[in-house]
Image (tube, rainbow, N blue to C red):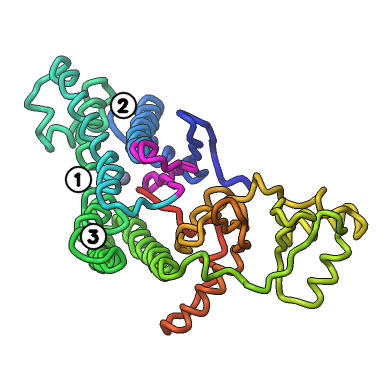
Amino acid sequence: MNVNLAEFKLLGIDVKVHWSFVLVLAFGAFLYGAGPAGWLVGGLYGALTIALLFVCVTMHEYGHALAARRFGIGTRSILLLPIGGVANLERIPEKPAQEIIIVAAGPLVNLALAILLLPLALALGDGQRIFSLNAMAANIQNPGVFNLIVFLISTNILLALFNLLPAFPLDGGRLLRAALAYAMPYRRATQTAVAVGRMLAVLMAVFGIFTGAIGLLLIAFFVYIGGSAELEAVSSRAVLRNFRAGDALTHNAVNLYTSERLERATQLIMSSYQTDYPVRDLAGNFVGVLTRPRLIHALREQGPEARIVDVMQPAADVPRSSPQDDLATVWEMMSQSGSRVVAVAEQGQVLGIITSDDISEVFQVMGAMLERRPSPASFGGEDRERGTYV
Ligand SMILES: [Zn+2]
């Protein structure tokens, strides 16, 4: 089932609008339709107001995405949900200065929108009414360009302020983490920011229950869960930082040769735990990798007689790391290239390969040693290094 109401691409980024967005538009129409303008005009005006509000939310997410692009970090998608937007960045920048810029760009977009709309509001109406909450509340249901602009100015200011609450993973919490990271290790900075975020989430939830603000309850839930997920990702990365690619190579790994057929690989799989095989030509040069998924696919399609060279992942498509790189860097290469193997090379000579299975094994063993429950599920997926910016 497609859960998206709409999907489009803008400035090279996929924007997905969740189906439940219809409910928010309907809610807006209902709220305004009950006002003095009547069901038809008021309802349409309400739906328009909410739609414009979410245009501002989308622009906030583009603020994060375009700032990240400056540091070479791509954005997989921007998702619009009833409680707000989420920009799925390919990874979380580890340099605090970069994270500060990416995070600040979101609320700055909303502040800029508010400042840009202000002269328009001043030209159209009474300046006193712009800054009076009472006047705004009294006129919010009255359709009109002036009222609409005043609404957008105040909601953009609110959006910026709300996102700056230090409730990790909200923008303010990310800024707190980045600031803390100057004074302590990244993992501890994340732990502290997550703890502060959880406290605020509980306060938000209590406030939401007493005032009946369901949106606030949902956000509190999101803050609580989202903080834990990212803490886990940061911890995994901290573990992987302790290992060099050169040390993770299997020394007695079996190679396959270009002259061989799949049959040979199936024999090897029966007799060893190795799942992916470097392929070399007769001179010993590295020419590719026969990965397990490719082996299985080719066996099904072509049978054991197929030649290994025809089905392997060619060397050009296998990312290369140096033996001195740490495993967190190797893992990043895997998630960025979509390859489950990385070749470890020194001076043009491929020493061996590291697979995503090898890395999750390191993590499981280390996880057990640290007396944490290992979670291969969070590790094997492509989601691991992704940063969700709200
Ligand atoms: Zn944001």
Sequence order check: which comes first, mark 3 or mark 2? 2
277 or 180: nearer the viewer: 277
Residue at (52% x, 66% y) in the render: 246
Return the residue at label 1.
161
| Label 1: which secondary element | helix
| Label 3: which secondary element | loop
Return the residue at label 2.
37
Sequence order check: which comes first, mark 1 or mark 3? 1
Ligand 1 falls in which quarter? top left
How packed mark 2 is, by other alpha carbons closer than 10 Å (few <14, some 14-19, many 20 or more), is: some
- x then y, percent, for residue 176: 21, 57
Is 326 left or right of 306, judged from the image as shown? left
Instruction: Give the mark toward the camera: 1 or 3.
Output: 3
- What amino acid is labelled 3 in the image? Ala
How packed mark 1 is, by other alpha carbons closer than 10 Å (few <14, some 14-19, many 20 or more), is: some
How packed mark 3 is, by other alpha carbons closer than 10 Å (few <14, some 14-19, many 20 or more), is: some
Is 326 left or right of 264, judged from the image as shown? left
Disc on res. 288: none
- Give the Cα separation between the discs numbered 3 and 2: 52 Å
- Give the Cα separation between the discs numbered 1 and 3: 23 Å
95 or 350: nearer the viewer: 350
- What amino acid is labelled 2 in the image? Ala
Q: Which residues are magenta?
A: 67-90
Q: Is residue 53 visible?
A: no
- Give the Cα separation between the discs numbered 2 and 1: 31 Å
Q: Within the magenta stretch, is there residue 78?
A: yes
- x then y, percent, for residue 172: 23, 52
- x then y, percent, for residue 259: 86, 55
Return the residue at label 3.
181
Sequence order check: which comes first, mark 2 or mark 1? 2
